[in-house]
Image (spheres, rainbow, N blue to C red):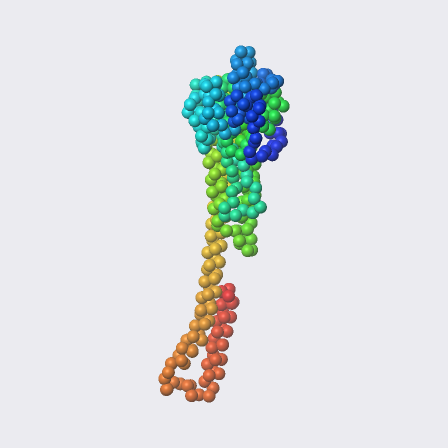
Amino acid sequence: MISNLRKAVRLPQPRTRGVDLSHPARSPLGTAVVNCAVYVDGVRQHGDHPADVAIRRVRRSGNGFVWIGLHEPSEAEFAGIVELFGLHPLAVEDAVQAHQRPKLEHYDDSLFTVFKTVRYVEHDRLTDSSEVVETGEIMVFTGTDFVITVRHGGHGSLGPLREQLESVPEQLALGPSSVLHAVADLVVDDYLDVTADVQIDIDDVESEVFSVRGSGGAGRIYQLKRELLELRRAVAPLDGPMQELATRPMREVDPRITTYFRDVADHLDRVTEQITAFDELLNSILQAHLAQVTVAQNEDMRRISAWVAILAVPTMVCGVYGMNFDHMPEKHWTFGYPLVMALIVAACWVIHRGFKRNGWL
């Protein structure tokens, strides 16, 4: 049932979504409202209703729930929904301002959950300044008869998720907590996809570092570590909320959904382990790169030292015979010059051969 959600095809979404101001479910509360629908027994009811009409319809019948989706609402655009559903001011402030850590908070008769969404940024080649991971946020208000999703960022659209859920009415029939689970499952599945793409970048850097050319620069390794830290900030704080949803009974969460949160928590643990392993691997790659640089510098110094030793012979001999003394041995000897030059060449040849044999040249 719930596992069918993973079979959904993730449709590509544009970075920004236009909003139809004439839409009756959007215009009364502002352009931030992307969708507003009533679900009864897991089936979306026909017709588009403003949020106030939708929630009155649900509470009058005592059956079903309302799902309202918003994208980057302002405080003024959110004010009508806040008053209508009695949302807590602290949660509303977090939902409007964004830039929150993943968390789960209880407010009276509702839950407020924050998820960090991530997207892998495609690039032809990793550079010292390449952006690898782009983050956004999804906030979810969950009540007994409503669920409100607030999305920040140019990715993480919930449109395909809503369509997929509507194709599985038995899932939506479990109430608002089924939407909360679906959002959590989608977010964590995206984590898995991003870590798979990041691993490709790490493998490429590792291959370059250990290639014959050894062209893998430390700048790219540090850039990957920075982007990996951004991914860790999105993933690690979510562990607590997922464990709480998976183990703690809550009035807003159907008991039949709790079991499925354990599956999401397991996937999240796998992502956390992968990120830790990636960080350790990058540390090893960086140490290997620095070791290669040190070895290359040592080899250069050995070559320089070898040539200095070779040049020291003619420098010494020429320095001695360059002194201006009248009484010097062999100074007026006919064969003195060719003998000295032969000795210089022979000495340099012997030293060069020795360094060559020992791998210094």
Question: Dividing the image into 4 quarters, which one contains the N terminus?
Answer: top right
Q: Give x and y (percent) for residue 197.
A: 56, 40
Is residue 205 visible in the rendered structure shown here? yes
The residue at 49%/19% (across/down) is: 143
Q: Is residue 265 visible?
A: no
Asked if 98 appears above or below 315 in the picture, the reply is above
Q: Give the x, y percent position of residue 128.
A: 50, 48
Image position of 57 with respect to 291: above or below: above
Side of 286 where 164 appears, left or right:
right
Front residue of 16/244: it is 16
Number of residue marks: 0
Q: Quadrant of residue 333?
A: bottom left
Q: Residue 21, image x and y in percent?
A: 56, 25
Q: Residue at x 52, y 48 (%)?
A: 127
Residue at image position (48%, 21%) is: 81
Above or below, 183 against 196 in this view is above
Foreground pick, 144 / 321: 144
Q: Is residue 267 above or below residue 44?
A: below
Q: Is residue 178 left or right of residue 344?
A: right
Task: Determine the residue positioned at 42% across, 86% down.
Answer: 330
The location of residue 206, given as percent across then percent down, is 54, 48
Instruction: Name the foreground residue: 28 vs 245.
Output: 28
Looking at this rendering, what residue extends furthest in the front direction? 22
